[in-house]
Image (cartoon, grey):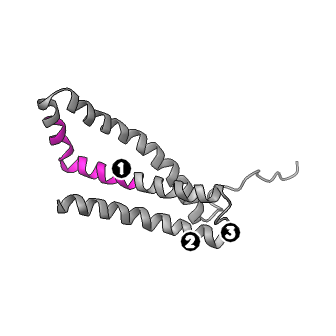
Amino acid sequence: MPYLRPLSPHLQIYKPQLTSILSIVHRFTGIALVFGIFALVYWIMSIALGESTFIKAQSYFRSWYSQIFLFGWSFCFFFHLCNGVRHIFWDTGFGLELPHVYRSGWLVLYGSISLTLCTWGYIYLI
């Protein structure tokens, strides 16, 4: 029986590239945003359900573990937003050359980190 080559190389053969990592992270941040919507809906519903419910929700969101969740969720939001803008440019035909793809990928990563840190810095300054 002749040697059959695999249809696709295994992940052990491929070296992770910025483009593939950003694509995977974009998908995961989209999923994380869906879960974060549940927290947002809970907070909005607590407003509608009365003052005592809202106070409980506020105390929950002020806890350290909720702050970590909200920080991560805000990073997911900004990453998904920046990468979505990048994809809009690609849909119009701009930035499809490989050097531009890598430059815009790093810009998405640094931009989402910067926007997250600026947002949380502003929150704690208030």
| Magenta-colored span | 56-76
Going by the numbered disc 3, the residue's amino acid type is: Glu
Local crowd size for mark 2, using a 10 Å CA cut-off: few (<14), some (14–19), many (≥20): few
**Residue 74 locus on image (x, y percent):** 35, 52
- x then y, percent, for residue 103: 56, 71
Distance from label 3 to label 1 (Cα)? 31 Å
Please state which of the two labelled residues, at mark 3 or mark 1, is closer to the viewer. Answer: 3
Q: Provide the major secondary structure of the magenta segment.
A: helix
Q: Which mark is residue 103?
A: 2
Q: Residue at x 24, y 46 (%)?
A: 66
Helix, strand or loop at label 1? It is helix
Instruction: Give the residue at mark 1.
Output: 73
- Residue at image position (37%, 62%) is 115
Is residue 43 rendered magenta in the image? no
Q: Is residue 70 magenta?
A: yes
Q: Which mark is residue 97?
A: 3
Say which label, 1 or 2, has the lower sequence index.
1
Position of 35 compared to 62: left or right?
right
The quarter of the picture where residue 15 lies is bottom right
Mark 3, residues whose alpha carbon is within 10 Å: few (<14), some, or many (≥20)?
Answer: few
Residue 24 is left or right of residue 71, and the answer is right
- Going by the image, does 119 lie left or right of 100? left
Q: Residue at x 55, y 67 (%)?
A: 104
Q: Is residue 17 above or below residue 28?
A: below
Q: CA distance from mark 2 to mark 3?
A: 10 Å
